Image (tube, rainbow, N blue to C red):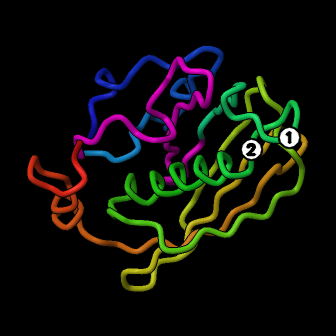
Amino acid sequence: MVDVASLPPIPDPLPDLSERPGWRRVSVLPGVDHEPYYVSGEPTGDRVRIAMFAGPDGAIEAPTWFGVGCTGPPGHAHGGVLAAVLDEVMGACAWNAGHPVLLARLTTHNRRPVPLDTVVRCEAHIVSIDGRKIDVFGRICDDAGSFVDCDGLFIAIGSDRFEGMRRTDDTPGEG
């Protein structure tokens, strides 16, 4: 379990959901020293600000803000950024449920554009587990409904294999 005090502060303008009974703040990859993250690695930047919380049932809810660094269509977030955020939130859902995983397939269904400079919710929950295959559903939404619905197939790899993926000083490609 990651010590919540070690997580960066919840970035403005995101709400703190840990005030809900049974909810707790979580990291993307609990128990793994792997920072910064591609999506959530700049908590005060102009791209994405996100804070993840797990509910009593293991579902993840993450208040998320998309800034001008995510611009796609005028005034709205780029679809690739939305997919990357869903990948991170859905993967965090599996990891926080005790399943170290990598993404195998991500299918997004864009319902309406996500406006910039607005706090929305990313949600994720595990749908099924079949051996090493873990199906996760995620979405980006607000009180009016979904912006993006997403189905993801994640493959459990084991934390030892994940640790073996780290680059070393003599790994080709290191600059």
Q: Which residues are magenta?
A: 32-61
**Position of residue 90 measured from the top left corner of the image (x, y, whole percent):** 53, 56
Residue 46 lies in the magenta stretch: yes
Give the camera-side residue of 65 and 164: 164
Residue at position x 16%, y 62% in the image = 164
Which sits in the foreground, 25 or 57?
A: 25
Q: Is residue 163 magenta?
A: no
Res 17 label: none
| Residue under the image location 45 percent in, 41 percent down | 38
**Residue visible at 24% across and 45% down?**
31
Query: Label 2 is placed on what type of residue?
Result: His
Secondary structure, magenta segment, majority class: loop
Dot 2, crowdedness within 10 Å: few (<14), some or many (≥20)?
Answer: some
Q: Is residue 15 left or right of residue 158?
A: right
Provide the secondary structure element on which disc 2 rests.
Answer: loop
Residue topped by disc 2: 78
Q: Position of residue 135 (x, y in %)?
A: 54, 73
Q: Position of residue 42 (x, y in %)?
A: 48, 26
Amino acid type of the residue tagged 1 in the rendering: Pro
Q: Is residue 164 left or right of residue 28?
A: left
Q: Give the residue pinned by disc 1.
A: 73
Q: Residue at x 18, y 52 (%)?
A: 167
Quarter assignment of residue 157: bottom left
Quadrant containing the C terminus is top left
For residue 154, side relative to residue 61 (left or right) = left
User: Disc 1 vs disc 2: Cβ atoms closer than 8 Å?
Assistant: yes
